[in-house]
Amino acid sequence: MREKIKDKGRLEHILNSINVLLENKERYTFEEVANDSILFYGFVKHVEIIGEAVYMLTKEFRESHTEVDWDVIEGMRHVLVHGYYKIKPIQLWGTIETDIPELKPYIEQYCRESQSE
């Protein structure tokens, strides 16, 4: 059973990985990441961390914050962990360029809300 008290920590983990991804996306080009397996799987790991932290959020939190499609994020985690051999660099990069920046303001808001609780 997941504990509600842990939602704050999970949100902080998500925000940390978002920040790492966005900062490093500025440091490396798509070609550099696609052609360097260590860089590539470093980016993959942070997307995985986001998915795992989402998976560990309580059902109550997810149900009360429906602005984010939690199931899609969790599904991405499953693909990255279980379908690691199918990961295409362009798909990962698209997630980092599009989905991660869209997710960030929501997670920042949820972190601020959790500090006032």
Image: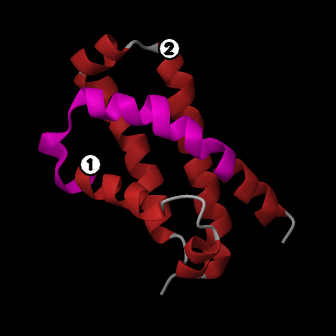
Secondary structure state at the residue bearing disc 2:
helix
| Disc 1: which residue | 80
The single residue placed furthest to the right in the displayed view is 116
Q: 71 above or below 104?
A: below
Q: What amino acid type should be assigned to the residue bearing mark 2? A: Arg
**Residue at horizontal 55 percent and vertical 77 percent from the top:** 58
Stretch of the chain drawn in magenta: 81-106
| Percent x, y of residue 72 | 39, 57
The single residue placed furthest to the bottom in the displayed view is 1
How busy is the neighbourhood of tag 1: few (under 14 within 10 Å), some, or many (20 plus)?
many
The single residue placed furthest to the front in the displayed view is 67
Residue 42 is at least partly visible in this image: no
Q: What amino acid type should be assigned to the residue bearing mark 1? A: Leu
Colour scheme shown: secondary structure
Q: Quadrant of the C terminus?
A: bottom right
Q: 101 above or below 81?
A: above
**Residue at horizontal 51 percent and vertical 39 percent from the top:** 100
| Disc 2: which residue | 27
Specify whether residue 13 is painted magenta.
Answer: no
Specify whether 13 is left or right of 54.
Answer: right
**Residue at horizontal 55 percent and vertical 58 percent from the top:** 68
Q: 86 above or below 21?
A: below
How busy is the neighbourhood of tag 2: few (under 14 within 10 Å), some, or many (20 plus)?
few
Specify whether 73 is left or right of 23.
Answer: left
**Residue at horizontal 47 percent and vertical 62 percent from the top:** 70
**Which quarter of the picture shows residue 36?**
top left
Specify whether residue 103 is painted magenta.
Answer: yes
Of the numbered discs 1 and 2, the one sitting upstream in the chain is: 2
Secondary structure state at the residue bearing disc 1:
helix
| Percent x, y of residue 27 | 50, 14
